[in-house]
């Protein structure tokens, strides 16, 4: 919401205030018979024209957020006519100053406020010079108060706008955090279920098949053959469930193949060469371990793309007898690991902890960044 939009939003309150002041001043002038009738009629007529102009033109301009210095000047002239006819009309200043701020921006409003406050001293020069000094002092106080009030109102509006923006940003951030947390929770639960199915049902069916075939290699007993077929069918179903619950990248091949695809996609999107090297004896790992390693590779390459400005990147997947190690290196600009607190690194650390892994981050401007994740497997 802009300052102009705030004026539009609260314009009905200013209009009500202007109406109350105008009616009260006009009524006081009209029913005070200490002044000639023609003067009272001139003053009330000028006030009536001011009200009509505002209702017909002014309020439309305000609600459309359109400035009009000319209308403000016309209203000041009409105010001067009313004040010249009946000095009591100077009480309209209470309504004139807000009207000026509604019709013009701050830079134009300040000189107009000064002008409208000098109307009464200007009239005194011709009608009552003895009151000039007092009215000048009143005009000074009134003008300063009016300008200060305009500054204050606009400042309040700007602060309200800023709070509104901050609240909107906070709500958007909270929604994004909730979405990411939900997605992370869903992914973690899917990975956990896939790992449970792989480590229990799938391995159990495999053991049943092995034991039955060991008891009757030829499966001459039809009941044993039926049991083997049933176990194989259920093994296939459990593997299908594991594949469905695992990340899409893993469902299309082994972990090294998935890492190679991620590196190839990174090189294609960024134009930065990315090599993948696999050492040791490749073997199947629990699904949850493969998910953690793959997600770490994806996040590390994403950080290289976003922040490193690297000329090349390299990925190592090293299989050891009791563990698997993933290393992602780049020759980019580096960063301070102690000061880094991004969602990506925190996410990798959280995933590593889920599989009792260790995440190590080394970085400096000369050698780039190395992210190493080692998990027991």
Image (cartoon, helix red, strand yellow):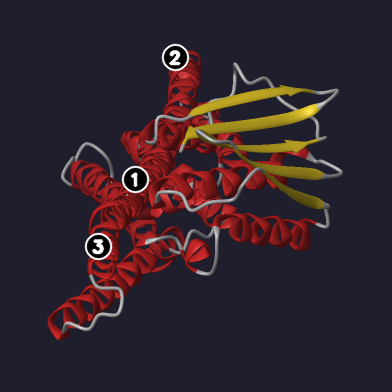
Apparent side of residue 209 relative to residue 255 in the rendered image (left or right):
left
Residue located at (45% from left, 34% from top): 352
Alpha-carbon neighbours of circle 1 within 10 Å: few (<14), some, or many (≥20)?
Answer: few
Residue located at (28% from left, 68% from top): 238
Q: Nearer the viewer, residue 140 or 375?
A: 375
Give above or below for 89 relative to 103: above
Q: Position of residue 20 (x, y in %)?
A: 21, 46
Q: Secondary structure at mark 2?
A: helix
Q: Which mark is residue 211?
A: 3
Report the residue that reaches farthest toward the left.
223
Residue where numbered disc 1 is placed: 181
Q: Nearer the viewer, residue 305 or 321?
A: 321
- Gap between marks 3 and 1 measured at Cα: 44 Å
Residue where numbered disc 2 is placed: 134
Q: Position of residue 289 (x, y in %)?
A: 44, 44
Q: Is residue 163 visible?
A: yes
- Gap between marks 3 and 2 measured at Cα: 113 Å
Q: Closer to the camera: disc 3 or disc 2?
A: 3
Q: Which mark is residue 265?
A: none
Q: Nearer the viewer, residue 184 or 141?
A: 184
Q: Earlier in the sequence, mark 2 or mark 1?
A: 2
Q: Quadrant of residue 68?
A: bottom right
């Amino acid at each position: 919401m802009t300052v102009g939009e705030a004026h539009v939003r609260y314009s009905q309150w200013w209009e009500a205030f202007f109406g109350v002041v105008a009616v009260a001043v006009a009524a006081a002038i009209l029913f005070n018979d200490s002044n000639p009738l023609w003067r009272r009629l001139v003053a009330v007529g000028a006030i009536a024209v001011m009200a009509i102009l505002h209702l017909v033109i002014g309020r439309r301009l305000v609600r459309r957020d359109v400035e009009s210095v000319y209308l403000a000047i016309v209203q000041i002239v009409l105010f001067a006519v009313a004040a010249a006819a009946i000095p009591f009309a100077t009480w309209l200043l209470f309504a004139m100053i807000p009207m000026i701020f509604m019709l013009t921006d701050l830079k134009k409003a300040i000189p107009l406020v000064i002008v409208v406050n000098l109307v009464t001293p200007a009239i005194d020069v011709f009608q009552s010079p003895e009151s000039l000094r007092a009215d000048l002092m009143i005009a000074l106080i009134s003008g300063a108060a009016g300008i200060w009030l305009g500054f204050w109102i606009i400042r309040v509006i700007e602060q309200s706008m800023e709070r509104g923006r901050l609240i909107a940003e906070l709500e958007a951030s909270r929604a994004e955090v909730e979405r990411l947390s939900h997605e992370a929770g869903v992914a973690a639960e899917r990975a956990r279920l896939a790992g449970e199915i792989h480590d229990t049902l799938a391995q159990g069916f495999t053991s049943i098949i092995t034991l039955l075939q060991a008891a009757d290699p030829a499966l001459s007993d039809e009941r044993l053959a039926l049991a083997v077929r049933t176990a194989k069918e259920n093994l296939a179903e459990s593997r299908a469930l594991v594949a469905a619950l695992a990340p899409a990248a893993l469902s299309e091949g082994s972990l090294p193949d998935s890492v190679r695809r991620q590196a190839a996609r990174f090189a294609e999107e960024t134009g930065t060469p990315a090599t993948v090297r696999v050492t040791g004896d490749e073997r199947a790992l629990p699904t949850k371990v493969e998910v953690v390693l793959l997600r770490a590779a994806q996040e590390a390459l994403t950080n290289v793309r976003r922040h490193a400005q690297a000329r090349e990147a390299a990925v190592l997947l090293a299989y050891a007898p009791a563990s698997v190690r993933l290393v992602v290196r780049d020759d980019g600009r580096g960063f301070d690991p102690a000061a880094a607190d991004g969602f990506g690194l925190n996410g990798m650390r959280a995933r590593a902890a889920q599989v009792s892994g260790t995440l190590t981050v080394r970085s400096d401007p000369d050698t780039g960044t190395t992210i190493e994740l080692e998990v027991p497997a």
